[in-house]
Image (spheres, rainbow, N blue to C red):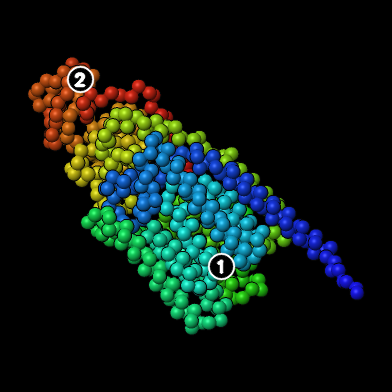
Amino acid sequence: MDVAIEQSHPLATGRSTSEGKALRWVVAALLATLALQLPLVLNRAINWDEFYHYSQVVKLANGTLTEPLQTLYTRAFIWVPGLPGLGVDHIIIIRLFMLACELTTLACIAGMATRFTDRTTGLLCALAYLSASFIFRHGTSFRFDPPATALLMTSAWILLRWGLRPPAMLGAALLAGTSTVLTVKTMLYAPVFVGIAWLLWTEGGRRREDLVRLLVLAFGVMSFAALIYALHAGTLGEESGDEARDLVSRAGSSMFTLGNPLYRWFIFVFAITSPLLAIATLAAPVVIWRESGSNGRKIALTGMWLPLTTLLFYQNTAPYYYVFMMAPVAVAASPAFALAQRRYGAHFIAGVMLLCAGAVLVVEPENTTERQRQIQREAQRLFPKGVSYFDACAMLSTFPKVNIFMTPWGIQHYLRGNLPSMVEAMKREPVPLLVKNDWMFDEALRTKNEVGVLLPQDLAAIRDTYVPFWGPFWIAGKIVTTGNRPVKWNVRVPGAYTVRDGAMIIDGRRFAKDEVMTLNRGTYILSAEEESARLLWGNRLAKPISNPPKEPYFMPF
């Protein structure tokens, strides 16, 4: 009996070997890029946005959080403020969770891109995303962008992988609903899910039944969002409903600003520093619609590309926004990367991407983490129980910050009178400390220039209320020089005050150097007796013996 033995074709064997080698190259480059990113996770200075996000966690832990929208992430980290260490160290711990979110997003990009191309191209898309400059730097920053991206991309991957089966619909709806409460930016992924819905509807062959299932899926997302919001907001106090309505109203009036040049420059920076992803992204629509796939496939990929257009009308497109926006766009670029891989080889493309990530690491500016730690350490030593303060970003996260988060969006509404002024905050409670950690406060306190981002009454109040103490710390007080007439001073920060440098006469009463008195709100007449004197808030606050950190306190984007 003759036995036929099938011989493998040499060409097929060679192709298989080549594809396996390419796959290993891409995996190696992906792992190497993750290794390069790890020092940024653990050592990169805390960004102003991260300080603010952590301050919200502290508020929840202290029972003072009232904003229900875009604060769901605080639930996951309520245990962190109780750990030993400074706020800087706590944020670095939270970054490890953000790293897990990034890894989830990378897996989803690879899985979704594989659905439209092949495994090597899928991993190449994940590498393109990770090695892109802004994502490499900010992909693990403590913001709600990484978890929202992971939730939405996982939801999209589930639908592409398992379609409209009930368990898949349940999981996808839960994840998308959670993201909806996490950030209002979730709506910017609408084209992604519309495209996937069209693909599933056209390929399923059960159009009426699948249409019903898609409607049920949409209802499920809204239902989970409503339930999660109710559970979260229900524990935040009576003010949470008003806070949510105010936020939605403000967001609706300014989130989308067609033609606003804010952050537009970063588009060019991203394109120059992430050239392969930028080229593939720009080529994607042409490649998608010229290939031979079904219209459903083309529409789905186009839907994943459309979040790129938010750069034209969404206001807050700072570099960390690219973490959120570029995840589905990287999938949309998969046909372009598949074409490039056939022409140039996956190993070459992966190598260039790895070099781009390494270049980002090489040109990192001076790290300011230790300066941030010193500022937090000295604040805790000076004020063990904490004090209310003004600053730009909640840098002293465990202290109650009583002015707004000074972002461009926040400043816009603050100047319109939609948010509380600093004068109002000082009337509400004593605010003895101002942390000069942004150009606006430097301009306000060091010069007599107009500062367009501060209300005139606030500018006048902080110039009249705060004097330099140590580094970025300005304390409520007044400097009185000899030879001048007595000055009127409006005390906006009541409490104990200490006379420093020389004797001072206050409302006709003499106070010796280092003497402490209590001043209430109101106007006082001050004069120096023989030499210049300072009146400083606090009971003989001891100036830190350490040299103050030099500026800047933050690293640029």
Using residue 541 as the reference point, say whether residue 99 is left or right of it: right
What kind of residue is marked 2? Asp
Select label 1 or label 2 by which is in front.
Answer: 1
Q: Position of residue 235 (x, y in %)?
A: 27, 55
Residue depicted at 24% across the width and 49% down the height: 420
Q: Position of residue 302 (x, y in %)?
A: 55, 68
Q: Secondary structure at mark 1?
A: helix
Q: Which residue is mark 1?
A: 161
Q: How many marks?
A: 2
Q: Residue furthest left?
A: 508
Q: Relative to 442, does residue 484 appear above or below in the rendering?
A: above
Corner quadrant of residue 86: top left
Residue 274 visible at all: yes
Residue depicted at 28% across the width and 41% down the height: 400
Q: Which residue is mark 2?
A: 514
Residue depicted at 46% across the width and 65% down the height: 171
Which is nearer the eye, 354 or 61? 61
Residue depicted at 31% across the width and 48% down the height: 60
Crowdedness near tag 1: few (<14), some (14–19) or many (≥20) residues, C-alpha within 10 Å = few
Q: Residue furthest bottom?
A: 208
Mark 1 or mark 2, earlier in chain: 1
Q: Secondary structure at mark 2?
A: loop
Q: Are marks 1 and 2 in contact (CB under 8 Å)?
A: no
Tell me the CA gap for discs 1 and 2: 73 Å
